[in-house]
Image (cartoon, rainbow, N blue to C red):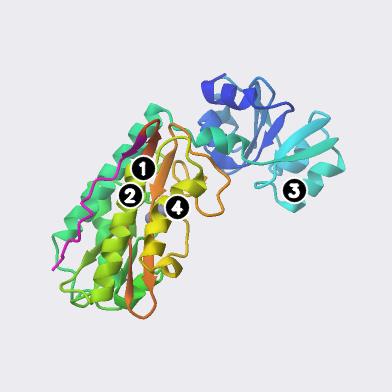
Amino acid sequence: MNSRLAAVGAKLDAPLLITNLTNVLYLTGFESSNAALLVEPGGEATLYTDFRYIESARAIDGVHVELLKRAIISDLAGKLPSSVQFEADALPYAQWQALAEHSGDLVPARGIVEGVRAIKDEDEVAKLRHACEVADRGLDALTREQWTGRTERELAWRLRELLHEAGADELSFDSIVASGPNGALPHAHPTDRIVERGTLVTVDWGVRIDGYYSDCTRAYSTGDLPDRLREAYDVCLEAQQRACDNIKAGLTGVQADALARDPITDAGFGAEFGHGLGHGVGLEVHETPRLSTESTDTLEVGQAVTIEPGIYIEGLGGVRIEDLGIVRADGVELLTALPKTLTEVS
Ligand code: ZN
Ligand code: ZN
């Protein structure tokens, strides 16, 4: 058994049926669209899949492999131990019903694998770092081009090309390019709006390489800004820097969030920062832990987290500044490296 299975096995007091395919991938290296994994306390594991994937499943080291029908979960009914935990966030109700009909105790469990997954080993950190470097290179190339006069959609498409040229396997998500008043929408989709002079353009983008994602945001000016937008940028940057300088292992997600939220609130922009400070990143763009006013997580050494305060002013524009870093005992090591001082694009 590998160290990841051992780590999950050590947390179990009853077998755990894993149906989250990203968790299956993380624990076994097995990538498929139809699989389940039963992990026993101690870490012994059985991998279930159908005929299409059985050959690649049998090549996986350190797990037992069993061939099931295409409807894996129904086929598993009656074959499981008498008491089994299942992933409450990853078992659809209809499948739970099929399983429950012929099974003993089904006990909902949450966050067991995600908690292990949140802590990255150095091989994973290297993959995250590489993804961040490629993402930085792609955006850096875009900042050398003309932005004003082009539409948000054109810039997003050009960024996609540059990211692939830089080495991306795919994008983490559709890039956000939000100019002028569109910058006030945290999850704006690029539109046909032409980027004008004298405003901010927020770009949120990332790439996936070797299964690992990057996530970064920068905002650029296109010339002299309205005073309130300039102030928002300065407040956001100072808050983001404060969080980068002070986040470390042992803080709660709520305390980390407050590092950036307090100065933004003190500057009068509290209502304009309506989302959490950040989230974990790894095999998914959004994973454990959460940094927000509602978080129940505590930061641990080796977690990969984003730090991304934003200020969104309806009708005028907005700014978000986001870095991705690794939580260390005495600080956070940033993997994203593009400058954050307000930079003008042409
Ligand atoms: Zn982002
Ligand atoms: Zn993010």
Residue 327 among magenta residues: no
Which residue in the structure is indicated by mark 3? 95
**Of the numbered discs in the image, which one, if any, rests on residue 246?**
1
Q: CA distance from mark 3 to mark 2?
A: 46 Å
Image spot of residue 270 (x, y percent): 43, 66
Image spot of residue 121 (x, y percent): 42, 28
Relative horizontal placement of residue 95, taking residue 241 as reference (left or right): right
Q: CA distance from mark 1 to mark 2?
A: 6 Å
Decide: marks 3, 2 in contact (CB < 8 A)? no
Q: CA distance from mark 2 to mark 4?
A: 10 Å
* Local SS, label 4: helix
Neighbourhood count class around disc 3 (C-alpha, 10 Å): few under 14, some 14–19, many 20 upward: some
Decide: marks 3, 4 in contact (CB < 8 A)? no
The answer to whether residue 151 is above or below residue 164 is below
Foreground pick, 61 / 91: 91
- Quadrant in the rendering for residue 27: top right
The amino acid marked with disc number 4 is Ala
Which residue in the structure is indicated by mark 4? 258
* Overall secondary structure of the magenta section: loop
* Local SS, label 1: helix
The answer to whether residue 238 is above or below residue 281 is below
Q: CA distance from mark 3 to mark 4?
A: 40 Å
In this picture, which residue range is highlighted in magenta? 331-346
The residue shown at (18%, 77%) is: 197
- Quadrant in the rendering for residue 210: top left
Which residue in the structure is indicated by mark 2? 242
Decide: marks 1, 2 in contact (CB < 8 A)? yes
The amino acid marked with disc number 3 is Gln
Residue 330 visible somewhere in the drawing = yes
The amino acid marked with disc number 2 is Arg
In the picture, the quarter occupied by the N terminus is top right
